Image (cartoon, rainbow, N blue to C red):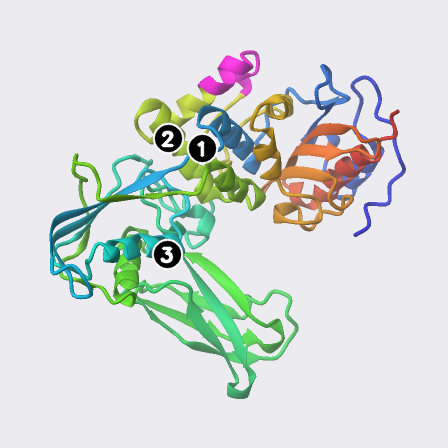
Amino acid sequence: MAGLATAALVLPAAAAPLPIEAEVALDAARVPREAMVAWVQEVGASAPRLDWQARQPVNPASLMKLLTTSAALELLGPAWTWSTPVWLQGTVRRPGPHGVLDGDLVIRGTGDPKLVPERLWMMLRRVQQFGVHEIRGDIVLDRSAFRPSLQNPADFDGDPLRPYNVQPDALMLNFKSLTLSFVPDAPAGVARITADVPLSGLQLDDSVPLIAGPCDDWRAPLMLDVADPARLKVVGGFRTLCGEKAWSIAWPEPQRYSERLLRGLWSEMGGKLGGKVRDGTAPSTPPSFELVSPPLAEVIRDINKFSNNVMAQQLFLTLGLTQRGLGSPELAREVLRQWVAERWPDAAPSVAVDNGSGLSRDSRVTAQLLGRVLQADWAGPAMPELMSSLPVSGLDGTMKRSRATLGRAHLKTGSLKDVAGIAGYVLGQSGRRYIVVAIINHPNANAARPALDAMTQWVINDTMN
């Protein structure tokens, strides 16, 4: 992939206005220069090379994840893990293929962001290895480690089916989402529909007619009817030329998702459940076993590479849980604000922390603070883990479509309806590495994304000796 066609520029030794390429891109998008803030500084340097309104608080969108993940790496460490304890509370009779648990299976959540189906299968398989194939009692879920605020998933943007709108949960199973796969079957004239997980009691249309037409917006001819969460209907048509596609949705009845998923998985594995799946309290006795999560370094890679809001919120509340004893938004905000205030006390008044993902209209941060956080990350012991979690220009994650030179920038992206931003590390042609932060707050922000690519390329093209 070729980089942007820009002239090589020498970064000045003192603060300067925006590079001309960025200004041209802003003009093309009808975005005034005042709508952008920017900060460029060589790693390890004491002063910025470019400082454009960098002390002005702006909405950072998903760049807020840099504060959350940087704080977590420092406070918890890159090898830190979540543990999900499980109790076989009762007596196991006839252990083996026909073993019965006379009692309850109890699972206590501690915020693990990655309880995906394959790991849930491992958990239930471990139960069967204890000789249990029938649970005469209930499956009890203890979610008390988190006390998330009561919000409607539609509160942010009116679209409760968007997976990023799923609310935090101490026992977050598979992001409370369902992925539908559409596979064209040309001889039959239909696209076959399958679901990625077995949700108990779910009825799903197994096909939709194939239709002609270009594969641009492949979802446009389709409509998902979720009026009855137990009966998902897919109407419309699927374009033959599109090949296999996947459509992920947040489950429309989130309060029953865990029940449906656990029942479905347990049944699919040949297990029987005599009771129900319900909320409750875990015992104070040692658990029968524990399911341990991947290390924090791996989790933040998912958070930053793909800007996973649900995982970021889980990590955010985990900071409250580990540092203050409870995973509540109020305590998590307190932890993050204190973390900033202790390290950069002059910047603390300009920071407004709403949540840990940046999916907010109220969060505020300055480009200067983000730059200073990235400087501290570079000098810190977890630098390799933080840097490797950032998307790489033209290669992966949310930077895969970047037009900046392939592979020379590790940048977190941020995007909301009226926000676009980047923040991270850029390797210049001179071999010097720079911290780059650029954020646009404007109704046309996303049309001005070429200005962010131009800023990145301008730094890549440095010719300093």
Residue 340 highlighted magenta (yes or no): yes
Main SS category, magenta section: helix
Residue 251 bears which disc, if any?
A: 3
Kindly check if marks 3 and 2 are in contact, taking CB atoms under 8 A apart as contact: no
For the residues labelled 2 and 1, the Cα–Cα distance comes to 7 Å
Q: Which residue is mark 1?
A: 355
Q: Amino acid at mark 3?
A: Trp
Kindly check if marks 2 and 1 are in contact, taking CB atoms under 8 A apart as contact: yes
Along the line of sight, the residue nearer the viewer: 257 or 37: 257
The answer to whether 156 is drawn above or below residue 462 in the figure is below
Segment tinted magenta in the rendering: 338-350
Q: Residue at x 83, y 18 (%)?
A: 13
Q: Quadrant of residue 179?
A: bottom left
Q: Which residue is mark 2?
A: 329
Q: Could you classify mark 2 by the number of other residues whose Cα lies within 10 Å: few (under 14), some (14-19), or many (20 or more)?
A: many
Percent of width and height locating residue 180: 45, 65
Q: Answer left or right for 224 relative to 26.
A: left
Quarter of the picture containing the C terminus is top right
User: Which badge, 3 or 2, comes first in the chain's sequence?
Assistant: 3
Residue 317 highlighted magenta (yes or no): no
Q: Could you classify mark 3 by the number of other residues whose Cα lies within 10 Å: few (under 14), some (14-19), or many (20 or more)?
A: many
Circle 2 SS class: helix
Q: Amino acid at mark 1?
A: Asn
Q: Amino acid at mark 2?
A: Pro
The answer to whether 109 is drawn above or below residue 59 in the figure is below
